[in-house]
Structure formats: C-alpha cells, structure tokens
Amino acid sequence: MCGIAGTYRWPDGKVMTDRLTDTLAHRGPDGAGRYGHPVGDGEVQLGHRRLAIIDLSETGAQPMVSDGLALTYNGELYNAPELHAELEATGVRFRGTSDTEVVLEAWRRWGTDCLPRLRGMFAFGIFDERTGDLVLVRDQLGIKPLFLLRRGGGLMFASELKALAAVTGKSLEVDHAALVASLLYYWVPDSRCAFREAEKLPPGSWLRCRPDGRVERGSFWKLKDVAAEGRDRALAGEQPDLAAIVEESTRRHLISDVPVATFLSGGLDSSYLTALAACHQPGISAYTIGFRAEDAKFEAMPDDLRYARQVAERFGVDLHEIEIAPNVLDLLPQMTYSLDEPIGDPAAINTYLICTAAREAGVKVMLSGMGADELFAGYRKHLANLLALRYQRVPRPLRRGVSGVVDRLPVATSRRGYRSVRFAKRFLSFADLPEETAFRRSYTMYDQDELLALLNPDLAGTVDDVVTEHADVYQDNDLDDFVNRMCLTDARMFLPGLNLAYTDRSSMAASTEVRVPYVDVEVVKAAFAVPGDRKIVGRQGKVVLKEAATSVLPKEIVYRPKGLFSAPLRAWMSRDLAPLVREVVNDGELVRSGLLRRDALARMVAEDAAGQRDFSKHLWHVLTLEYWYRDATSGSGQSARLTA
C-alpha cells in the first residue's frame, strides 16, 4: 500500500509532483521516488511513497520503470502469483517478486484488457514513453482512492485530495453541492468531490491523457452488470459455495512479506475472517476495542469484548484490547484532516486508533470485515425496509396512533440513552414512504424538508439535485429483488463513499494497510447470485453468510445480536464536546458564511439536550464539517461568499 501522485503537461510539474508526494508521506514511510519524461511541449512526472508489503527489496521500489513503461502503483494484487506464472510462460523475465511488476508486465502484454483480470485493490498511473500516453486506473469497487484535477491541457493526480489542495495553494473552490450531499448522508458520494475542479476517478474505470490534449475515458467493470449476471445465475438454479469463496478470498488476502493482523469486533464478519485467517496463520494477532464503562452504559452499547475474547481463545488468536477513551477535542480536527472530505462517521476514530496500536506493535497489514453488511443485507435498515412494507398494511388510524405515542417518548435521560426508542423513531420516519424514498430516508440524516430548513435558501435547488441523484442510482438496475436492489445501491454508494473511504484514509494516516476480503470481485459476484430471500429470512439478516460461517464458528457468535463498530457519540456530545457544539452553533464559520442556519442548529441542540430526539450523529457531523470548512476556506476568501 502506498501513496501515488503525478502531473501531466502541468507547469512546474517536477516541483509540484515532489510537493504532492511529500504531502502523502504518511501513506508510505518506507521509501520515496519520482520519475520524469518529456511529453510534447511539456513533461510527465510520477511520484511515489512506499509502504513496503511485498518484495521488500529495491526491486519493488517505485515508480517502476522498464522498457519504455513507467508505473506508480497503490494497492495489492491477490492473483499476482497466477498472472506472474502466465506472463513468465510467455517469456517475461521478472526482476523481483512484487505485484507492481506483475501489473506493469500485464499492461505491456494486454493494455486495458488486463484490467478485468486484476483481482485486488488498486489505483495507478502508467506512462508509455513511446506514445506519450498517461493512463490512470481505479479498481473495480473503489477500494483505493484516486483524485485528479485538470486545468487547460494539464492534469494532476494523487491518492488524497489534501495533496491537490495543498499544492494549488488553496485556490480550489468548495463545491457546496458536495457539502449538501455530505449533510444528507454524512459523507460525500463517490460521484462528487468537495472541491469544484477536482474529481474522483470512478470505480472500475480508466482515463487516458494524450500528448495532443485529448482525454479518453472507459470502464472495465460495472457493478450493475455483475448484479444482473448474478440474478441470471440464481434464476438458472446456480448456488455459489459461499463458504469456499470467502475462505479462498481470505487466504489470498493474507499474502504478505510482513506480519498481518485482523480487526476483531466480536461480530460475525470480523469473527469469521479472523477464524479463517487463524486456520492459515496460527497465532495471528487481532485487535479489538472497548469503551469507558460510563460511556458504554450511557450509550446502552452491547458487550462486544466478551465475544471477541471467545473467538480469540477458541482459535488461538493473540488478542490486543484497546480502550477507546480519546481526547476527542484533539482527535476531531486531526481526523477531519486525515479524512480529506467531510465524513461524519466516528468509526473512523476507531479505525485510526486500532491501526495506530497495530503499527506501534510492528504490524503493517490488517484484515477488516468491511463490506459484508452491504453485500449480504446485514444492516438494520435492510430489515427495517422489509418490515416497512408489512407496516404499510396496518390500518392508517392505528399507524397514526402508534406514531403519536412513540413521538412523545424520550430518546435519553441525563443518565442513559434508550436505543429501542431511537430505533422506533427512526423506523417511523420512513415506514410510510415509497420504496426508494424510504430506503434513502432509512440511512440518511434528514428528510428533504429538514435539510432545506437547515441550509441557506439559495441551496434549495442543490438539495433537489442531490436527492434526485440518489433516486437515479437506486433505480438504475434490472433487478426485481427488493433486497438486492438495496444491496446494489449500498455497494455503489454507501460502500465506496463512506466505509471504504474512511477505512483507507484513517488507516493510511497511521501508515497501515487495511485489506477487505469481502470486497473481492469473486465474493461480490457470489453475493449477487444469492436471492434476497436467502439474505433476509424472517427477522434475520445476512442469513446466507451466517450459514457459511457455521462451518467454522460456534452458533453463539454467528447468531448473536448485531454489534456496532461505532463510538459513544451521545456521551461525547453531552460531555466532552458540548462547549464546542455551542461555539459552532453561535459563531461557527458555517453559520457566519450563511451556509447553515443558526436557528435550525440551535433547535437541534435544544431537542437533543432535552432527550426529545437524538441528534448526536447530526451534530457530530456538523462539527466535522465545520473543521473541514475552516481549513478549506482559510486564506481563500471563500467564506464570505456562498455559491451553489
């Protein structure tokens, strides 16, 4: 895992690329390199920061240059051994054992046709000295990030947005549509970018820059097509052997020349991966988190630690327990900087602290259970949306009565929160809505009217655009299966926009690589070959994965209540962060610039403090957005103007 950067026909490209690469030093503390070559009336420059995982010798250093091709590469290729053997059989002579060299030689032989054959996570830039073409590529599911910026005939790219912002001297203008989207979702969708000029290369796609200024784009893998193929396989009666596919993916994700450890929350996904990993690497280390007793009690959080300990003892895992008692006032601005864009999920803090502890113990690589919930319908929202269809059959007068009673219940007192009441209020906020609207409302922060009330009125049209974009993505499929429609939307929006994004950025801030065996092309293909009625059965979600896991794990772990990889937000907001919330509401940059309305924020704070509604997640995200906005607009004069 590494940091990549570069420029193409950009003024002062050499200087700019060095600055880009320096900004990414945390992604690759084991080495640095740069390559340059003339292109027409300009030049190409490729930069690299190395986190050495496979082939620790100099034969794995980058940018890698060989016979007219130059490559700067970030990622891991899990089928590298097979491709290495295939290429070697055609006469290729490899200098080392790195997967970087496999990618370079695969490109030489097959060009863009090699891309569907790559099984892993990757983002790279490859330059051909003979044609003068630079091609940028991002993996099938958007596990690895790649940001780019075009001006005139020039292009600049990097693994992180902060690098582009830094080297352009904060001349980039904030995209308020992206900020509106982040308020709705608490993350910025992968289709948008927080700065206007910048963009994210879409998952499963490539971009080619030519010396004459032409730019071409193409895609090599589309999740929509994979889902349709899976539906056809299911209709034909094909039943994937999910246990074998997950086991094989986990085994491949253990390939490394440095120690590998796992996240172990005690939930199904991480427990299953840890058990499988321990079968291949006995004594493997795992890291888990706990919270201060008073925070866990206030939040009514389940005791995940006992399940993690049970898994560790059963499979001989070396378990490291980390208590999350952070100084959130210090961590909040630090995490906001690391996350690049306004992302309001506090799980990023957990990931950062776990990866920091692992790195201090000499571990560079971690396996995460990320992705299983999206692909196999494991979130509460999936079940809740199915239940909503049944709820809509209840007579309307009775539904109104239930809603009135629940609306009057408090979500918290001064001593503790009531999770069941929070869930009930959340459910009733979308249970009567049409399918796509209900699904959006089941996991977003506000309904459309609430978001409009929070924002400057000039952004009303932007709200419509953001909401319409969700509807377009949700409806862009050929599936007749409600559960798999939700899973497909999650895999296209929620997974790359939030979970993979914060996992990459918070782990790399600690110079640690996180691998995600469930977000593997073969696992994804299998997931969409499973009908929705095998994913959710009765009130059990993720059933098909649970059935696969019973071959390894005890049923007590497999069928335990779902845990939360989150943080005790209500406790933090009512104690540690209360003064900061007041400051941001009364005199924050978001309010002073006119982006957010003070009265709406003050109303949220009052209702949350009274225990009437739970706005802890909303207010946490406002804090992250405030810190991000302050940094993004400092010295640029943007805070004085609002442009939609």
Image (cartoon, helix red, strand yellow):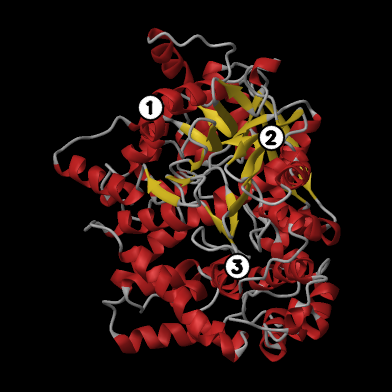
| For marks 2 and 3 on the same chain, the one whose residue lies earlier in the sequence | 2
* Mark 3 or mark 1, earlier in chain: 1
Q: Amino acid at mark 2?
A: His
Please tell me which residue lies in front, 104 or 522: 104
Question: Mark 1 sits on what residue?
Answer: 110
In-front residue for pair 593/579? 593
Say above or below: 30 vs 219.
above
Q: Is residue 563 visible?
A: no
Q: Earlier in the sequence, mark 2 or mark 1?
A: 2
Residue 605: x, y in percent?
72, 81
Real-space CA distance between mark 2 and mark 3, rounded to the nearest whole angstrom? 25 Å
* Residue at x-position 69% and y-position 54%: 164
Name the residue beneath numbered marker 2. Answer: 48
Measure how far apart labels 3 and 1 are at the Cα level: 35 Å
Residue behind mark 3: 196
Q: Is residue 61 left or right of residue 547?
A: right
Where does residue 638 sit, x and y in percent of width and height?
74, 77
- The secondary structure type at the circle numbered 2 is strand
The correct choice, above or below, for 404 with respect to 303 in the image is: below
The quarter of the picture where residue 62 lies is: top right
What residue is rendered at 82% in x and 53% in y? 326
Q: CA distance from mark 2 to mark 1?
A: 24 Å
Return the residue nearer the eye: 124 or 120: 124
* Amino acid type of the residue that numbered disc 3 sits on in the rendered structure: Arg
